[in-house]
Amino acid sequence: MLDRRLPRGVVGLGTADIPLDARITQAAWDEDGRLRLKGFAYVRNLPAGRIAARARIAWLRAGKRRAVPLRLRTVRSREATLASRQGLHSYDRAGFEVVVDPAKLVTTRAGATWNLELGAYAGGLLPRTGPVRMSGPCPVPVRHLDDFLRLVPTLSDGRFRLRVERLKARLVAHTRDGEHLCIEGELAPDGPGAPIALRVENWRTKEAHDLPVTLGGRTFGARVPLALFGAAQGAADPWGVGLVREGGAWSPLPVRPDIAPGRHALGGGRELMVLANPSGNTELRDQTVRPVVDTVRWEECAADSACRVCTDGDDTGHLLLAGSYPGAGRRELVLVHSGHDEEAVLPLTLADGRFEALVRPHAVAGPAGTLPLAEGNWYLFLREPGESDPERRVPLLVAPARHADLPLVRNLRGRDLTVQRRHHDQLLITSGSALPERDQGRGAQAALRARYAEQRTLPRRDAVLYASFDGRQYSDSPRAVHQELLARNIEWEHLWVVRDQQVDVPPGVTTVALWSAEWHEALARCRAVVTNTHLPEWFERAEGQYVVQTWHGTPLKRIGRDLAGSASADRKYIATLPARADQWSLLVSPNSFATPVLRGAFGYEGDVLASGYPRNDVLHAADRDKVAASVRERLAIPDGRRVILYAPTWRENQPRRSGRYGLDLQLDLAAVRAALGDDHVLLVRRHYLVGGAVPDSDFVRDVSRYPDAAELLLIADVLVTDYSSMMFDYAQTGRPMLFHTYDLDHYRDTLRGFYFDFTAQAPGPLLRTSDEVIAALLDPDAAVAGHRDSYERFREAFCDLDDGTAAAQVADAMLAHVGDGGRR
């Protein structure tokens, strides 16, 4: 009889199919000198109930025979489920805590390396055991147990280890004597023979120098010439320090725990810092002069206090950062996002070699309002005001005495803000998710989508849900429609989608966090939805619901289905477009040219309102001069200065982290200033998908976070762009446009493609180089004089519908279909 059973190797479950995932998320020494570790551990791909009901064990192992059991306590860990990046199982009960007593690890005179391991029982299977891992550099400082005994936490390929070390010698003092650094140390009572030299070695170049030592019983000393340092060009050049003994044996020189770091000027803006590295050994760091934070704490401020930063009646306080900085000149504090390089610039006080900054990471003032730091890691630097070179900003370092104080965590305005260190001593602030914990993770989002489907059958709310650029701004055509409905006193709720708390909305508007339960409910039940980007693929218009798609620009470059077959095509996204478009009740068209293009690009067959864009009504409003004056005042642009708006689009071939694209400004901003002088202001507007930042100066202003681009068009005397749809809006002003098309052939023929012959129809000169743009900016009217006819034809083709009534036409269409809900 034929055996139809599959081989055991096919149907059986191996370790790779159900692996143990064990990670440490927090590690710190407590006041009793014990190491407390928190994390999570689960057997991946097993249902939650099968692991949650089973006990887990933990131990430290040294070699094959020695093991120290650890008492493990199970705790709740929502982070475990989120880190699993799946929505099928919940691992919320997979958290653990263990406490390590260093005294139990000191078992021999030779020292040992202990590996943290963990085992989990699940589903009647054999225990799954394995190492416990930790992401990033080890944040736990070295712990000194005795004069010449220490415990060094380390990570090896992500595995957490504790290394017991019996020291042979240690650094006890470092001083400067003229052009020499004097190193003093002491030898362990029962250590090996006396050293014959002190070795300093550049870890990067491997340059090494053996220097003579003087001996005096158990003490030794050496003089290190400062002339060895100061020639490095990089931000930091580390040198190791160790002792050489007879036979050539070399060992690093540990630092006694009470020895403070030292800094010695080398000239040329550089210094030599003497400090302990992550392993607790002596390091000489040849670096640009760095600020060293020796005070870091949260301070409370009463609502009636005279605090310099807590001026809004908010008593949640601020973060005090203070320390030493012997650098000269003016400096500003800049926080830089590690993913997309956005910046937040804050004031700084410098005096007598010290600095101080009061930071409110939950309320940072900027062009978009006073908002929390966006989610992610923000590293702290000092730089000269207006400096644009990232290599010239210097990081804030944390003094070793403060390492044990971190991390500091505070929950403000619904998100965790964590002050911590990375790369051993670099300071950063981590801004956690603004989304409620209950709504985070794939499982929670799947449940919310299921709930959304149920809520679609509930009665409609007399409310409008607005979304501009997926919750990134209070701007564009949705804003114009909102203001029109307000002016009509329509008795509706107005809900605005906000991503990551990064939008400041006017009074009377209720914010709805993107991806939250409230957002799902609003999508299901609001009587009307107004958006300028796509709604989620799973969105399905409910009965009695009216969805207005305003989109966000006249297309020059190909979009949607018209990208099929190009380098920028996303086949999965393109396949969803007809179904997405079928959920719209109305598509707003900016001009007659765009109507068939948008229909075809999205596969849309419904109603179109050929009204022009509501966002451009401000360009035709009777009070536009008054609005322009208020915009100039808000941006602190002095009277009489001409305004240049520089607004390049994004490039798909320059992706960065965090869903952003690279900032690649081809216009030489310094050369522009040199040519135009002080009677101009250059406003730089990045596309909302582009990361990075342009430091502000008296001449350059980064207006990328300014809420509404239409208001910038009002004050711009000339527009410099490349292929941005902003050209179609700005054409309504009749003012000069210059096109910096340095990559025209590649962009047109390879990257995106155009809907019309831009070379022939451009309403201004196509300029290949930065110098050509600068020359044109010296006299924009002369530069565009030969394009007057093409400019008029451009306006006839692409501004034929704009007359300042677009928002009113959209509001009329909405009210005709859903009613006005009553009037005040």
Image (cartoon, rainbow, N blue to C red):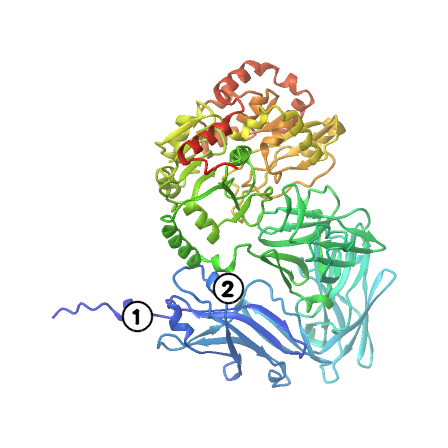
Residue 3 versus residue 456 in the image, above or below: below
Q: 253 or 615: nearer the eye? A: 615
Q: Label 1 near label 2: C-beta < 8 Å?
A: no
Q: Quadrant of residue 448?
A: bottom left
In this view, the residue in front, 454 or 418, is: 454
Does the image show residue 250? yes
Q: Residue at x 47, y 70 (%)?
A: 94
Q: Is 120 on the left-hand or right-hand side of 305?
A: left
Callout in the foreground (2, 1) = 2
How many residues crowd around disc 1 within 10 Å: few (fewer than 14), some, or many (20 or more)? few
Q: Taking 204 as reference, is 476 left or right?
A: left
Residue at 68% across, 32% down:
630
Q: Earlier in the sequence, mark 2 or mark 1?
A: 1
x, y percentage for residue 692? 61, 43
Label 2 CA crowd tier, 10 Å (few <14, some 14–19, many 20+): some
- In the picture, the disc for residue 330 is none
Question: Residue at (61%, 31%) from the top-left corner?
Answer: 711
Q: Is residue 766 above or below residue 379?
A: above
Disc 2 residue type (three-letter): Glu
Disc 2 designates what residue? 79
In this figure, which residue is indicated by the disc labeled 1?
Answer: 12
Q: Position of residue 684 (x, y in %)?
A: 64, 35
Q: Amino acid at mark 1?
A: Gly
- SS at mark 2 in the image: helix
- Residue at x 49% of width, y 34% of height: 552
